[in-house]
Amino acid sequence: MADRRGLLIILSSPSGAGKSTLARRLMQWDSNLEFSISATTRAPRPGEEHGREYFFLSEDAFKQQVTDGQMLEHAHVFGNFYGSPAGPVRDSIDQGRDVLFDVDWQGEVQIRNSDLGKHALSIFILPPSIPELRRRLEVRGQDSDDVIAKRMLKSWDEISHWGYYDYVLINDDLDATEEKLKTIVSAERMRRIQQPGLQEHIRTLQAEFEDQ
Ligand code: ADP
Ligand code: 5GP
């Protein structure tokens, strides 16, 4: 058995607050982190590859995986289905590797309520202001004005679920937010429940104590 169990690290935010940027930085920080590649029914964007950003599935294939119990969670977001395949997550956390999820609030609730929920760590990323959120979506240059308007409209729905999360970070200065995230992950890795070898160590201490 691994020395420690992996965490399910859930990052959520309104689109544009900086969650993907922070997720990338966390992945660069520690090679022990795995990114949970979601399945989706949305079309790939230019540059996206099947099996790298997402597993791009037809609606029928997606629904079949849900029916077969292969999704840890799934949700309908911006008119498409998204879901997190369960198999790789279970393997990783048993091997002591943390899994990073970029999912919306519906995903957070379902992961928290799943059998793996006790290993979940959820972090919500807030923008410093709504005008700054809009500016970031514009600067990113990935979406048309129409899509940016839709994301802005949806942003309050996502923000309104901030209270379900273990931690909430205001992503003003990117480097400072990154440092806070690393601090949170480092501490949470030491939760008692994340250390399966503790019982054994306690038994050894007890035997030594009784023998002295
Ligand atoms: P999300 O994944 O939440 O949709 P991104 O990570 O794509 O957001 O970030 C949106 C844009 O904002 C990107 O251009 C990114 O470089 C920029 N960004 C992220 N965090 C900050 C920050 N703290 N200050 C300024 N710009 C930021
Ligand atoms: P995008 O299409 O821009 O990549 O993602 C749109 C939204 O879907 C984002 O808010 C993202 O967090 C969410 N999302 C991506 N994958 C999943 C998933 O597997 N489950 C859930 N619940 N949400 C997801």
Image: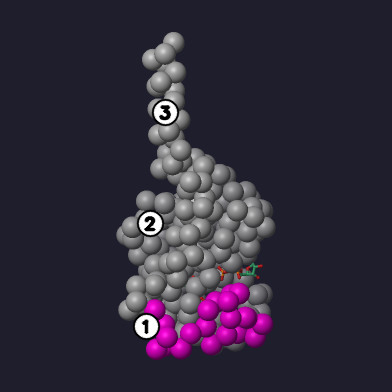
Give amino acid for label 3: Ile
Residue 141 inside the magenta-drawn segment: no
- Residue drawn 43% across the image and 67% down it: 86
Q: What colouring style does the render use? A: one colour
| Residue 98 screen position, x and y as percent | 52, 54
Q: Given the image, on which type of amino acid does mark 2 rest? A: Leu
Residue topped by disc 1: 64
Q: Is mark 3 within 8 Å of ligand 2?
A: no
Disc 2, SS? loop
Residue under circle 2?
116
Give the total number of marks visible in the rendering: 3
* Ligand 1 positioned in quadrant: bottom right
Q: CA distance from mark 2 to mark 3?
A: 25 Å
- First to last magenta residue range: 43-65
Secondary structure at numbered mark 3: helix
Q: Position of residue 148 (x, y in %)?
A: 55, 81
Whether 79 is drawn above or below 71: the answer is below
Asked if the residue at tag 1 contacts the one at tag 2, i.e. Cβ–Cβ closer than 8 Å, the answer is: no
Which is closer to the viewer, label 2 or label 1? 1
Gap between marks 2 and 1 measured at Cα? 22 Å
